[in-house]
Image: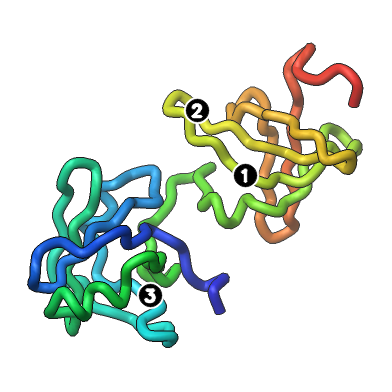
């Protein structure tokens, strides 16, 4: 079930007395919150969908109001919880853009040689960096550049890369 959802933020605190939530965004583009209609969260032990009734950016955080969360006490029940959006409500990605959660766990190959499994993505600003862990638990840092990443097959869980000369020596 969680595979149908994408994490968009984490509630770090309440804001004010009317149930507003202070959220750390987990997205490459914070303006995506401007278009959010629904979020889902663990509320009192139940996975529940909420309608977004207000949202604004404040000092790098997102302040969000949810229908049915009207008091500070209601909001405190969401403290520490991740907010998710159902894939059907997610923003459309451009060609060659992927959700990080879909990249985690795919196998990375250079030609026919398995380099390892993608375990994380570093968002550096200029370009992302894929962290790939090999069978010896070593990490390979692969720049997410078109000149390096030849193809990504999300369904087949396979990424094909052409590593720059000297990036790794002994693999």
Q: Is residue 122 above or below residue 12?
A: above
Q: Which quarter shows the N terminus?
A: bottom right
Q: Is residue 5 above or below residue 163?
A: below
Q: Which label sits on residue 6?
A: none
| Residue at the spot 75% in from the left edge and 18% down from the top edge | 167
Q: Secondary structure at mark 3?
A: strand
Q: Nearer the viewer, residue 95 or 105?
A: 105
Instruction: Find residue 158 and report its horizontal and vertical position in percent.
Output: 75, 49
**Mark 2 Cα shell of 10 Å, populated few (<14), some (14-19), many (≥20):** few
| Residue at the spot 30% in from the left edge and 77% down from the top edge | 77
Q: Nearer the viewer, residue 126 or 146?
A: 126
Q: Nearer the viewer, residue 75 or 164?
A: 75
| Lower sequence index among marks 1 and 2 | 1
Nearer mark to the viewer, of 3 and 2: 3
Q: Which label sits on residue 127?
A: 2
| Cα separation between marks 3 and 1 | 23 Å
Q: Is residue 105 above or below residue 148?
A: below
Q: Which residue is mark 1?
A: 120
Instruction: Find residue 70 and report its horizontal and vertical position in percent.
Output: 12, 79
| Cα separation between marks 3 and 2 | 30 Å
| Residue at the spot 42% in from the left edge and 83% down from the top edge | 47
Q: Which residue is mark 3?
A: 41
């Amino acid at each position: 079930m969680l595979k149908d959802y994408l994490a968009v933020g984490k509630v770090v605190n309440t804001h004010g007395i009317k149930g507003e939530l202070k959220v750390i965004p987990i997205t490459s583009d914070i303006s995506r919150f401007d278009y959010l209609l629904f979020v889902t969260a663990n509320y009192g032990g139940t996975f529940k969908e909420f309608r977004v009734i207000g949202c604004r950016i404040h000092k790098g955080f997102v302040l969000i109001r949810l229908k049915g969360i009207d008091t500070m006490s209601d909001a405190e029940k969401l403290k520490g919880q991740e907010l998710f959006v159902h894939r059907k409500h997610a923003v459309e990605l451009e060609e060659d853009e992927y959700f990080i959660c879909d990249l985690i766990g795919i196998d990375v190959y250079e030609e026919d040689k398995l380099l390892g499994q993608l375990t994380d993505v570093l968002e550096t600003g200029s370009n992302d960096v894929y962290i790939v862990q090999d069978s010896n638990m070593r990490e390979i840092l692969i720049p997410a550049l078109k000149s390096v990443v030849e193809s990504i097959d999300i369904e087949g869980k396979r990424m094909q890369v052409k590593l720059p000369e000297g990036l790794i020596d002994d693999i």
